[in-house]
Amino acid sequence: MTTYALKRLLLAAPVLWGVTLISFLVVRVPPGGPARAVLGEKATPEKIAALNEENGWDQPLIVQYGRFMRDVFLRFDFGESYHRRIDVSEELAQRFPATMELSLAAMLLAVMIGIPAGILAAVKRNRLADYASMTGALIGVSVPVFFLGLLMLMAFPFLPGGGRLSITLDIEAVTGFVPLDALIGNRPDVLEDYLAHLILPAVALSTIPMAMIARMTRSSVLEVLGEDYIRTARAKGLSERIVHLKHAFRASLIPIVTVVGLNFGYLLAGAVLTESVFNWPGLGQYVVDAVLAYDYNPVQGGIFLVAVSFVVINLIVDLSYGLIDPRVRVG
Amino acid sequence: MTIKRILLLFLLLWLGTGCGKRKAGPGSEGGAGAILVFGRGADAKKLDPADIDDGESVKVCNQIFETLVTYAKQSAELVPLLATSWEQSEDGKTWTFHLREGVTFHDGTPFDAGAVVFSLDRHVDPDNPYRFKGAFTYSSNYRVIETMEAVDPHTVRFRLKEPSAVFLANLAMFPASIVSPAAVKEKGADVQRNPVGTGPFRFVKWVPAEKIVLEAYPDYWGEKPELGGVIFKPVKENAARLQQLKRGEIHMMDNFSFSDIEPIVDDPDLVFESVTGMNFAYLAMNNTHPPFDKRKVRLAVAHALDKKKLIQLAVFGYGATGPNPMPPSVWGYHDGIEDYPHDPDRAKALLEEAGFPDGFETELWAMPNPRPYMPRPKEAAQIIKQDLAAVGIEAEILSPPWNTYLDKVQSGEHPLCILGWTTDNGDPDNFLWQLLSKENAVKGASQNVAFYRDDEVSEILDRAKSELDPGKRKALYEKAQERIHRDAPMIPLLYLPQMIAHRKEVEGYTVHPIGVVRLWPVRLK
């Protein structure tokens, strides 16, 4: 098991390096450069030259890349946001918890509803429960999150319309995660307000993963239910419940865990639209704003952080295969 | 089944907790000391007034900082603020300002002539140690200052390199806000997130991407605000911002889409206010690019455009148009000029006279992203293309990304392009000289994208820059506008309104044509 884990960990390194290279190039490839875009209609040759010099944007690419790698890996320094002059790492530390909270909440909902729905659909195949949950899944995956979000805002006027907390409430940022900080600071009112703000975006965001998890669970469980050892279990006289939950479920877990992991990665990176509609101050909005403002450093930092998270999640998923299926550990 | 019971419970919960409106949370009720929540499209970038150039940062700084002079309530006329009076010398090169007494910064330090010199020196001296590697986009406006002197704690004297008629207007702009020297020296670059000014509201805290909280400054020298404080809340999506306004989660909002105006007007709880703004959109013809070097061709284009239709289709009727390269709200606007009427036949005749009986092919450049003066550039470009096609001019629309767009357009690679201008200080020089003097037609970073290089007009505009007599100055600008209209290097397309939407509980707000947001006179019922 340890060798398996180590091997997986070592493979992560070249992936991360590749990500830094791509994120570095991607912001520099489009022609024109950031100076002119950032200065807008009021740009003059002097201002552009001054900005380029100050940020090292006029250096050859290889020099810029060398500096970038040195700063990121030796000092964890992603530079400053041009517009706000704050360290990108500081801003990432502020925005990442928000995205993590939303993604976790959405994932929890998706798993808590998606898996049981999938199992139910598999067990009651071709009956009402099956058709109902699969239709629900189809709708969930088809309705654009943005539209769904706006619809929910209109349908639930008694729930807050955006943000993480009501405008007049404040909480000391100890960990950066609001629910934890509320518990640490003994502020149940803040926690309640936070949860009220979390519901709508979490539900909106969870619809797509929930649908995918339900479908994957259904097909995976169906496949397992057709296996010989399930027939044996039934023949032994075990109750349907034990057959399903103890034997079938664990065997069908691997594809489900894969889908959960992939979706979690998608949530971390792709919560932009939900964050936009519900004004959730997360990483997605942060990176998009930086892209639109031609602000290099936050874009690089943001891409890197999302990639690292994805690698970590995939690593956990890979390791969990070893836990779920003993055959994997040996191979 | 348990599932049915859960669904039933949820349904009851939804109906029970009511379809009532949600209040914006504690502290948002009306009365004295109320907190106003202002919803805007994006967060501020930083709060150092000398170093900002984006509207959201300016909006917040406007409540915290003050300048020597400022704009009148609803015009670009200049009135005293931190300076109570001023004199100019005969040659116009020396300005003496008498400062208001009894004013303190939010950190308790006194406002005096030293603070004025300190604040402006950050612009005047390129090696000033308090520039903190910022962009300081507007420093060039203040380089006309040769020396500054704090004659006594309440008198400042400026000696200029040459007489300047825009000097006073530039002192009213936000980059000339007076900052607390003590705060800048103590906090260094951190002042960008901890501003200290003399204004009616002082800074409390900034939670990035969530809110900026200001409170009324109890020792303010002037009329203290009735509001207890203001919270600026960034809400990116226009649709979401409108929803929040309707629910009362925010009290005011700006920068909404033109398509949001009708729902606002129809809602009895909301109020829509607007006033003619100080920006404009134009179609620039590159006068160095044939055939637009021929005046008749340019006039043909002028007659080909149906500007009224453009207003209807591009901005849903919420705009105006006119003949001049600055909107009517700007001082010096010549209202005696008749605009070229929409006349496709006349256009075709002119083209024939110019040697193009069958029209010609060309390129129309339009920016891919909305701008304050042009919220729907793609639609506008389509409409213009149609109008041109009707007289035989086949225009291909090109929309490179914004940074390349500016790059190429300012280098003169375009035959036709759509661009615009938002005023910095409300002065006519800021429109006419900036956009049409031959000095600014420098390939590579030209702000004169029509590349209009007329000697006579440039001379008039240069003279007007330093003409201190307002009557003579106005006459010069009127002459310039007449000549410009005759030569038609560019065609002004749209003058857009400054708009704001707020709940009916919000009273006392005045929309300003330049777009300055002033929250201290506001009351929340």
Image (cartoon, coloured by chain):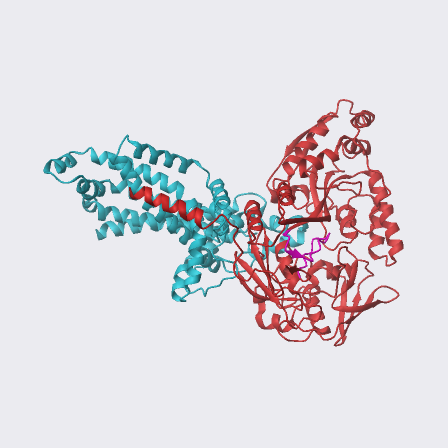
**Residue A216 in the figure: left or right of residue B177:** left
Chain letter, colour red in render = B
Nearest the viewer among B5 and A50 is: B5
Q: Report if residue A70 is visible in the image.
A: no
Residue A293, horizontal then vertical, whole percent: 57, 49
Span of residues in magenta: B502-519
Tell me which residue sits at (40%, 44%) in the image: B11
B520 relative position to A92: left or right: right
Q: Nearer the viewer, residue B323 or B458?
A: B323
Q: Give the position of the N terminus of chain B as an image quadrant.
A: top left
Relative to residue A324, is residue B492 drawn left or right?
right
Q: Nearer the viewer, residue B224 or A21?
A: B224
What secondary structure is the magenta-colored segment mainly? loop
Q: Residue furthest bottom?
A: B152
What hue represents chain A? cyan
Magenta highlight on residue A193: no
Q: Is residue B509 magenta?
A: yes
